């Protein structure tokens, strides 16, 4: 839970926003003047401030300036109807360290959602980055040192278990040792150690329940070895903490001289959760980035650009190294398309801009960018190269893992689950070529991007690398920028391909198969940790009528609007998929049935208010019905939960549609007195708790 100060004199904006924060479990404090907000911050306990652009006693930028002059590093979100130009944006993000710039009008729900995503990442009064690095390094080293005796002690305990059989005090002691590591390893940047400790602890607990079970004893040595190997992996370097680029999703729009497309593009960018910043020319945009800013994506209009302006754009995109680029132009002619290829554009959008196509592109970019710092594994027997490459990558925000021998490569791959592998060619034992060939034959790692590195030069080596299945090739010694650019390009491409293979193009939601895979993993996780989990099946009401009366295209627009709204609601970890036709599924990890039903009924309220237009220009609205099932109460597998949710969906339809049914006859637990049946729902909609309806 965080405490958020809202500095805003307009109650119509601050009150709904405060109420959204409260619904997300945060505290909100509304201040109507700059003086009042300074006083609140001086009292302490504020984690983030939302600042309006115009205030009764000052303006937002001046107020933030005062805040920084008072030496406060509290994260600030700036919300305003002004300051959309590049220079103001630069002042806000670079000089004043604002973590998010949002333009009004913005709905309270969307803004609270955006800020909610920032909250876990922001740290009030964070120490300076250099100090964080040093402190982190020291702590990490200390922690790693402390792992050696634990590994030794555990090894001893495992040996005794195998030789002398089960002895309760020894197993209990071993469990306490791994339990402590399970809780702390991740915080020290060693997720693989934490995960291995978690598996080992679970196995020990299960053994304590059935000490005579030989099968439960047999798994212990393997799990211990995995843990011991993970504990030996080199410590990843800390990522710099100063960057705000991962949290702020910015679309830098290089407008055409006529400025015709920029407002429309900015509107779509905002709708899809980006902060648009408009620059008048490629030179201005380049200067912006030279100042250290890096947007999440670039949108460039090619119209009216002569050859030299196109060259500046090329330099700009090269400077951005792998940043997603969208190009627009009135003419999809060959020259524009060739330029798009040279500029590495993810998409060419022909003008007039089709809002749906642009939305789809922005959504893809957001998904790939928000995937966070990618884990990268470097395998090289040359420790010096290993350390150097690891430090370059860590400093640039990658989660870096380094391995100096190939002996346990497969185990490390399984633990780290890298998004990219940097592989040396000449290593003792097995060569990088052979590893590459082997990975291409394995189902799990077939598509893993691999960059091979070697001091060898020459065409035959390069050809052999590509024949072995490598995606790219880098000669040693490398230049930092080249290494980073090559990695970024490979990562972006792999993420985009994954996205396209897993997502339904109409709604942007997960297709059924990847949804099922992720849902099963979420269920396994919930069962392991004992956290609640709910599933909801949703079906659009009378959709056949929409198609018949409004036209198939209007029907498609309803589904795409539904998908867009669903994407922008709920938490990042909630899974959203198109189950088929006009049926959708949501998995809400960590949420019980009551909270889930509340969230979905709020979503129903919003969807019911969405206005669609048919081919004749007539407006209409749609509704949906839903059935919710909870892990534990309604079953232990995805199949059970879907079946129950489907039965309840049927009840919702039978009960008159436009409602969510969250508990049925098969549920053994009774709803809470203030449970689902007392929810506030859209007018003429109900949330049922009946056994008798179906
Ligand atoms: P109910 O309220 O009982 O769910 O009735 P319904 O009309 O929504 O359900 P029904 O199953 O009778 O019709 C669903 C229709 O959805 C039939 C199918 O053609 C249409 N549909 C499925 N996928 C798409 C799609 O991608 N686009 C469009 N436009 N229609 C689709
Ligand atoms: Mg339907």
Image: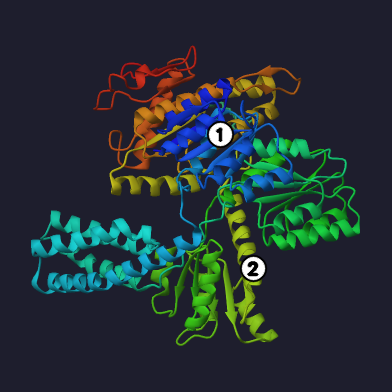
Location of residue 598 by image quarter: top left
Residue under label 1, please give it.
Answer: 111
- Give the image location of residue 54, x and y in percent: 65, 29
> Which structural element holds mark 1?
helix
Asked if residue 122 is positioned above or below residue 313 in the image, the reply reads: above
- Location of the N terminus by quadrant is top left
Residue 358 is at least partly visible in this image:
yes
**Residue occupying the far top of the picture:** 684
Q: Residue at x 64, y 21 (%)?
A: 611
Q: Is ligand 1 less than 8 Å from the beta carbon at label 2?
A: no
Nearest to the observer: residue 498 or residue 656: 498
User: Ligand 1: which quarter?
Assistant: top right
Asked if residue 27 is positioned above or below residue 182 in the image, the reply reads: above
- Location of the C terminus by quadrant is top left
- Give the image location of residue 479, x and y in percent: 64, 75
The mark found on residue 486 in the picture is: 2
Ranked by sequence position, the earlier of labels 2 and 1 is 1
């Amino acid at each position: 839970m965080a405490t958020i100060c809202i500095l805003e004199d307009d109650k119509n904006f601050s009150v709904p926003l405060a109420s959204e924060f409260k619904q997300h479990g945060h505290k909100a404090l509304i201040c109507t003047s700059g003086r009042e907000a300074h006083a609140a911050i001086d009292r302490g306990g504020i984690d983030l401030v939302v600042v309006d652009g115009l205030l009764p006693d000052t303006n937002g930028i001046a107020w933030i300036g005062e805040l920084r002059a008072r030496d406060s590093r509290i994260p600030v979100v700036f919300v305003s109807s002004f300051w959309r130009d590049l220079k103001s944006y630069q002042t806000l993000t670079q000089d004043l360290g604002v973590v998010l710039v949002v333009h009004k009008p913005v709905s309270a729900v969307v803004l609270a959602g955006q800020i909610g995503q920032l909250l876990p990442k922001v740290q009030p009064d964070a120490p300076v980055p250099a100090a964080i690095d040093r402190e982190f390094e020291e702590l990490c080293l200390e922690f790693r040192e402390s792992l050696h005796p634990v590994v030794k002690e555990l090894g001893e305990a495992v040996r005794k278990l195998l030789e002398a059989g089960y002895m309760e005090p020894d197993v209990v002691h071993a469990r306490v040792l791994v339990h402590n590591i399970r809780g702390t390893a991740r915080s020290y940047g060693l997720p693989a150690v934490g995960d291995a400790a978690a598996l080992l602890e679970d196995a020990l607990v299960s053994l304590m329940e059935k000490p005579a079970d030989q099968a439960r004893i047999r798994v212990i040595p393997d799990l211990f070895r995995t843990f011991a190997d993970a504990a030996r992996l080199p410590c990843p370097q800390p990522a710099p903490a100063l960057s705000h680029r991962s949290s702020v999703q910015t679309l830098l729009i290089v407008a055409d001289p006529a400025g015709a497309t920029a407002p429309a593009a900015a509107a779509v960018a905002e709708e899809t959760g980006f902060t648009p910043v408009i620059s008048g020319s490629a030179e201005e945009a380049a200067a912006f980035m030279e100042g250290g800013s890096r947007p999440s994506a670039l949108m460039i209009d090619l119209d009216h650009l002569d050859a030299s302006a196109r060259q500046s754009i090329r330099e700009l995109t090269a400077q951005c190294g792998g940043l997603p680029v969208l190009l627009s132009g009135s003419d999809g002619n060959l020259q524009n398309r060739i330029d798009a290829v040279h500029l590495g554009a993810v998409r060419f959008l022909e003008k007039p801009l089709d809002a749906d196509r642009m939305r789809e592109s922005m959504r893809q970019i957001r998904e790939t960018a928000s995937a966070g710092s990618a884990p990268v594994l470097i395998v090289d027997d040359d420790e010096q190269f290993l350390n150097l490459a690891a430090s370059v990558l860590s400093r640039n925000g990658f989660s870096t893992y380094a391995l100096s021998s190939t002996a346990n490569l497969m185990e490390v791959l399984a633990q780290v689950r890298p998004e990219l592998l940097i592989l040396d060619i000449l290593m003792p034992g097995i060569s990088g070529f052979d590893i590459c060939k082997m990975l291409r034959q394995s189902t799990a790692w077939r598509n893993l991007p691999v960059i091979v590195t070697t001091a060898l030069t020459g065409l035959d080596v390069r050809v052999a690398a590509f024949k072995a299945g490598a995606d790219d090739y880098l000669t040693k010694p490398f230049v930092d920028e080249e290494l980073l650019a090559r990695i970024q390009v490979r990562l972006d491409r792999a993420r985009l391909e994954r996205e396209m293979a897993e997502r339904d193009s109409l709604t942007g939601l997960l297709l059924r198969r990847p949804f099922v895979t992720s849902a099963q993993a979420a269920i396994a996780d919930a069962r392991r940790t004992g956290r609640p989990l709910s599933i909801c099946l949703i079906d659009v009401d009378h959709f056949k009528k929409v198609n018949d009366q409004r036209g198939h295209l209007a029907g498609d627009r309803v589904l795409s609007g539904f998908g867009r709204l669903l994407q922008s609601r709920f938490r990042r970890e909630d899974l959203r998929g198109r189950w088929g036709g006009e049926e959708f599924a949501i998995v809400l990890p960590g949420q019980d049935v009551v909270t889930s039903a509340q969230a979905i009924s709020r979503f129903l309220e919003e969807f019911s208010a969405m206005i669609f237009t048919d081919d004749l220009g007539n407006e209409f609205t749609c509704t949906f019905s839903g059935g919710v099932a909870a892990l534990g109460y309604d079953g232990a597998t995805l199949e059970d939960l879907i079946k129950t949710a489907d039965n309840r969906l049927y009840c919702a339809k039978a009960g008159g549609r436009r409602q969510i049914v969250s508990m049925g006859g098969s549920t053994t637990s009774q709803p809470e007195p203030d449970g689902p049946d007392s929810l506030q729902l859209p007018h003429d909609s109900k949330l049922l708790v009946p056994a008798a309806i179906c």
